[in-house]
Image (spheres, rainbow, N blue to C red):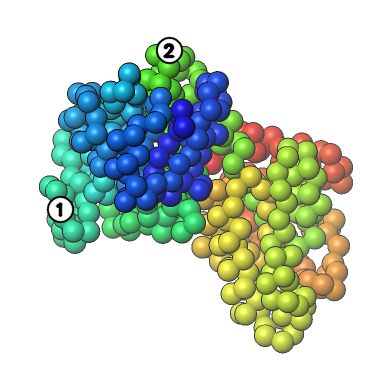
Amino acid sequence: MEYGCIGEKLTHSFSKIIHSKIADYNYELKEIEAKDLDAFMKTADFKAINVTIPYKQAVIPYLYEISDTARKIGAVNTIVNKDGRLYGYNTDYEGMRALIERQGADLSGKKVLVLGSGGTSKTAAAVAESLGAKEVLRVSRGGNDGAVTYDCVLANHTDAETIINTTPCGMYPNIGGMAIDISLFSNLQSVTDAVYNPLCSALVTAAKEKGINAAGGLYMLVSQAVFACEKFTGNSIPSSVIDRVYKEILLNKRNIVLIGMPGCGKTTIGKAVANEIGKSFIDTDDEIVKKAGMSIPEIFERFGEKKFREIEAEVIKEVAALQSAVIATGGGAVLNPLNISLLKENGITVFIDRPIEDIVTTDDRPLSSNRDLLIKRYKERYAIYKSSAQAEIRAVKDLNANIAAVKEAFLNENIGD
């Protein structure tokens, strides 16, 4: 291996994709078990590597020299092999700082909670201090290594104004999880999450729903990769590269989630959009039929709506964890707020608002199989569609116009970022 990243679990890492967009070298992902780390580091058969969970501290004894920043933090994420001697750096520090600055979070004079006990938590604490935080508390379950416990936080520190998460809580595939309940913090002004997969973790989604300034970790990941590449090659890279690569990765990975009334055209529009922009297409109703082994009318007839909604929630949690897809949801998916929260973790929700007079009823939609039922559902759900949507399009009879409107919403970098 010439260049790459080592860690325990790297199956869903974005690092290889990111480095391929930054520089012209072969970058590999290498999963290493703890028992094999010693041999790998002593052999040092590489030119330069990144280091991720859980080895950012474990690699330090093998290094000939480490940067002042890495020494202060006690964690290394970038190693360069110079004539057999290993030099360690912490580009996570610069990446985290770049993320918070881009986010526009003001930490000056604030009480900051850093969730986590690993190397990234120490990095985040150092960044918070450099940005003028009044008080920085690292938080872990055991309260070891200078950290306080979560119980201590809930008893004494719910006045915190900033939370930075460095735990893997909510990370793919276990989306939907949060290390702490942010509703308990009445003074909270910003939330920053180092988790980048999903793109917008449950913690970030919950903060945004409360109007709190929040950002996920993708920009940090891209930034630290650019800074690491500079160490790898000795070349300076323009800061504009960070923004370009970030946007490319975001648009590639982000889902488009279509919501709206039964018969509004979600499937037709969704398939066409997916085909044009090179994403896969998923219809949650089709996935429900596959999971249940029977049609939707049969599910309703044999088990009722409650069972259908349970299966729908299971399907939505599964597809919400996927990326680079156009997802057409059933008309009633918005009735469960958790469905929408999960779908927002990797996607933007687009309301296909078609005039009720243009929607045709069909027998395969049990709750809107005739005109009266359709109008009833429309009145019940319209406000929910509006409140669940991050973007809306007024559907017309021209399919191409609808496709263009959805694509425009998707390409709007201010939506869901």
Quick one: which residue is furthest to the bottom in this view? Answer: 302
Q: Amino acid at mark 2?
A: Asn
Q: Secondary structure at mark 2?
A: loop
Towards the viewer: 60 or 353:
60
Q: Is residue 65 above or below residue 166?
A: above
Three-letter residue code for mark 1 = Asn
Q: Residue, x 45% and y 41% (percent of image)?
A: 30
Question: Seen from this angle, which residue lies furthest left?
Answer: 146
**Residue that badge 1 annotates:** 144
Seen in the image, is 247 located left or right of residue 45?
A: right
Callout 2: 10 Å neighbours few (<14), some, many (20+)? few
Q: Position of residue 31 (x, y in %)?
A: 43, 46
Q: Secondary structure at mark 1?
A: loop
Which residue corresponds to mark 2? 235
Tag 1: Cα neighbours inside 10 Å, few (<14), some, or many (≥20)?
Answer: few
Q: Position of residue 8 (x, y in %)?
A: 39, 49
